[in-house]
Amino acid sequence: MAGSAGNHHVNSGLLILGLVVVLLGLAADRAQAQLQFGFYKGKCNATDVESTVRSVVWGKYQNDTTIVAALLRMQFHDCFVQGCDASILLDGPGSEKNAPPNLSVRGYDVIDAVKTALEAACKQVVSCADIIAMATRDAVSFANGGFYNVQTGRRDSASPAKNVALPAPNIPINQALSLFARKNLSPVDMVYLLGGHTVGVTHCAFYQSRLYNYQNTGRPDPAMNTTLVNTLKKTCPDPRTNGPTTAPANLDQNPASALVVDNSYHKQLLRGNGVLQVDQDLASRNFVTGLIVSNIAARTDFNAKFGQAMVNMGAVEVLTGQQGQIRKSCRAAN
Ligand code: HEM
Ligand SMILES: *[C@@H]1O[C@H](CO)[C@@H](O)[C@H](O)[C@H]1NC(C)=O
Ligand SMILES: *[C@@H]1O[C@H](CO)[C@@H](O)[C@H](O)[C@H]1NC(C)=O
Ligand SMILES: *[C@@H]1O[C@H](CO)[C@@H](O)[C@H](O)[C@H]1NC(C)=O
Ligand SMILES: *[C@@H]1O[C@H](CO)[C@@H](O)[C@H](O)[C@H]1NC(C)=O
């Protein structure tokens, strides 16, 4: 009797042990399949991956402060076309790089320089998708946008994206909201993320339709500040006259803040100084985003909130664990 009670005890002990092992296994699987902070700690010989990225990006930033805008736009495009999987970096026909609205997607040389430095320290350990996220974070911090911790553990796609459609500059706000919602990004995330337009430039073709004959009214877009209309007309001619286009326009119309990551973009929207249709529409009280814009413009914690939104965007449709690959070169699948 005592023996069988003992056996029973041992059996239930084993059962519990088994359960614990299974649960731990599940937890490990799950941890492996998720992004995490500091994924590369101790994984690249004696090299600290994040500080290597930072020093390469710092060198590039000192030469050219516009890499902040380049990297922000790159991360957005990467994450919104087939997930944050570095598919945007692939060369060749049919790749995202060659998709029509690719004007001003730049910064590939920054990613290549980081990749070269990391491959010299540990081969095929750090993904190109993670390099985009880390390099963008560092660039943002150099531009006074604050330092946010990024999650890592992404893997790279083995093939370019099939559907490379990017949102047009005049995408209606309701469509933008549903596009972001499909990526698990909230309206608040979206309004912070459009704040990426606090740096960088846009070209005449993307806002020309607002300056002269808006929706066939023969007048500019009434939502655009008339001072801005007149300024932009100087460098962006009436499409019906075929005049020469010259300089691109800053997306953040406060010249003192055009290279700084802050809430100046949102403040400018409240004055009718959004350059793209999507920018100005964001501030419209016809949409839930209008209140969010006013709120962000009045707050003093932009950096932390923007960083959180960037982390959220960085988690869109990622490859992790054994999915995808770690590319040797960011420009080509292995
Ligand atoms: C509905 C969403 C969005 C639309 C329709 C949109 C559209 C555009 C357009 C049309 C340009 C100008 C391209 C050119 O003139 O060459 C641009 C530039 C830019 N976008 Fe966006 N964008 C969106 C969201 C975002 C997000 C979420 C970010 C980053 C978090 C971002 C960051 C940038 C940056 C930094 C630039 C300037 C690039 C440079 O100066 O090199 N955009 N965007
Ligand atoms: C420095 O920046 C310019 C663009 O402003 C670029 O053409 C050049 O390649 C950069 N040099 C280095 C070493 O990155
Ligand atoms: C953008 O796409 C065009 C073809 O549509 C291509 O010729 C050009 O090189 C691409 N730009 C970049 C920066 O890859
Ligand atoms: C880094 O470590 C890997 C093993 O993880 C080894 O194969 C490689 O030779 C090391 N690289 C250098 C540059 O020491
Ligand atoms: C138009 O922009 C200027 C310059 O930022 C600003 O001073 C003015 O208040 C704006 N006008 C309106 C109606 O918001």
Image (spheres, rainbow, N blue to C red):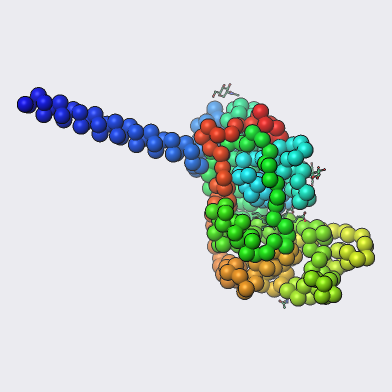
Front-most of residues 84 and 42: 84
Question: Which residue is at a point 63% across and 36% down the rendered structure image?
Answer: 157
Give the x, y percent position of residue 150. Answer: 55, 46
For this view, does 254 lie left or right of residue 7? right
For this view, does 90 lie left or right of residue 244? left
Which quadrant contains ligand 1? bottom right
Give the x, y percent position of residue 171. Answer: 69, 61
Give the x, y percent position of residue 319. Answer: 56, 39
Give the x, y percent position of residue 240. Answer: 91, 66
Question: Which residue is at a point 80% across and 71% down the rendered structure image?
Answer: 214
Question: Which residue is at a point 57% across and 52% down the rendered structure image?
Answer: 183
Compared to 65, does 59 lie above or below? above
Query: Which image quadrant: the C terminus?
Result: top right
Task: Give the residue furthest to the left.
Answer: 1
Residue 130, quarter of picture: top right
Residue 195, quarter of picture: bottom right
Question: Which residue is at a point 82% across and 60% down the rendered structure image?
Answer: 204
Residue 155, quarter of picture: top right
Front-most of residues 293 and 99: 99
